Image (cartoon, rainbow, N blue to C red):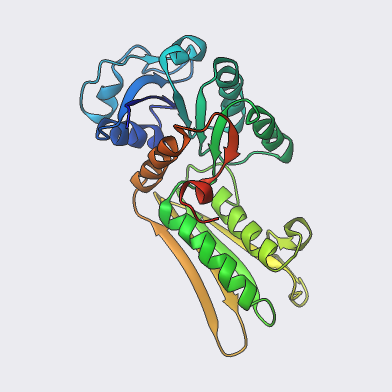
Amino acid sequence: MTTQKIAVAGSSGRMGRTLLEAITHAPDMQLTAALERPDSPYLTKDAGELIGTHCGVPIASDFAIALKNCQHLIDFTRPEGTLAHLAICRAEGIKMVIGTTGFSTEQKEQLREAAQEIAIVFAPNMSVGVNVTFKLLEIAARVLNEGYDIEIIEAHHRHKVDAPSGTALRMGEVIAEAVKRDLSKVAVYGREGVTGERKPETIGFATIRGGDIVGDHTALFAGIGECVEISHKASSRMTFAMGALRAVRFLVDKPNGLYDMQDVLGLR
């Protein structure tokens, strides 16, 4: 495979540094740009210093200039920033791998519009294991669609700003689609006080935030006399980075279109 020229947004963040490390060790990838906000204290420093090495790529804040020599942008930042980067990539014909979560319905529509012109992999979780878990949930939900109460529990580090996580919401969407329910109508995001009996059609979400938990997700199907749990636990952000690189490889021959990790992994 021809070497792919990669840019990383939010390069000094926890996920950004993990992506830098993964790209550095991938023989078919070349880090061409490392990007940060204009107020970042890391600007102009060698991006390799963030992971204890030297790569000759200075950290920059001007996306329009830095992306000129890139083929792909990997973006795990925040919705507003990702959409600003999307506009530049769309104008320059640069493909995107987006792991950002917390998009509104309207913001997701902007991704769909841009995908008419550029190729995008957008997924709430790039982990290969998580995306296999989505497939298992689809199968389980079809079989356990009656007599089982469905709850989704997720835990993340104290710095995560959105809740429930994008992965938890995607788990809910996969289950709801499999049992032909509208998640927007049956989701329950919090319980307090006298809530009354649980309605059987609901899908509940519970959120935990604390410490340095990378990401734990469990879907629970609770019936009478048994409980089925399907879980995924991430112990390192490297699993997300390696999935993102698989997404880059998937996009190499794609001129445009909006894809997710189910497409990348051939799970459709």
Q: Quadrant of the N terminus?
A: top left
Q: Is residue 133 above or below residue 54?
A: below
Q: Residue at x 72, y 61 (%)?
A: 187
Residue closest to the eye, 195 or 134: 134
Check the image and name the residue furthest to the top. Answer: 65
Q: Quadrant of the C terminus?
A: bottom right
Q: Which of the 4 image quarters holds residue 188? A: bottom right
Q: Residue at x 40, y 42 (%)?
A: 246
Residue closest to the eye, 209 or 240: 240
Check the image and name the residue furthest to the left. Answer: 53
Q: How many marks?
A: 0
Q: Is residue 40 above or below residue 25?
A: above
Q: Is residue 126 above or below residue 63?
A: below
Residue 253 percent location from the top left of the image: 47, 32
On screen, residue 23 versus residue 101, left or right, reads: left
Residue 63 percent location from the top left of the image: 49, 15
On screen, residue 214 versus residue 104, left or right, reads: left
Q: Which of the 4 image quarters holds residue 103? A: top right
Residue 11 percent location from the top left of the image: 39, 27
Residue closest to the eye, 195 or 222: 222
Check the image and name the residue furthest to the bottom. Answer: 225
Residue 21 percent location from the top left of the image: 29, 34
On screen, residue 104 versus residue 131, left or right, reads: right
Residue closest to the eye, 51 or 75: 75
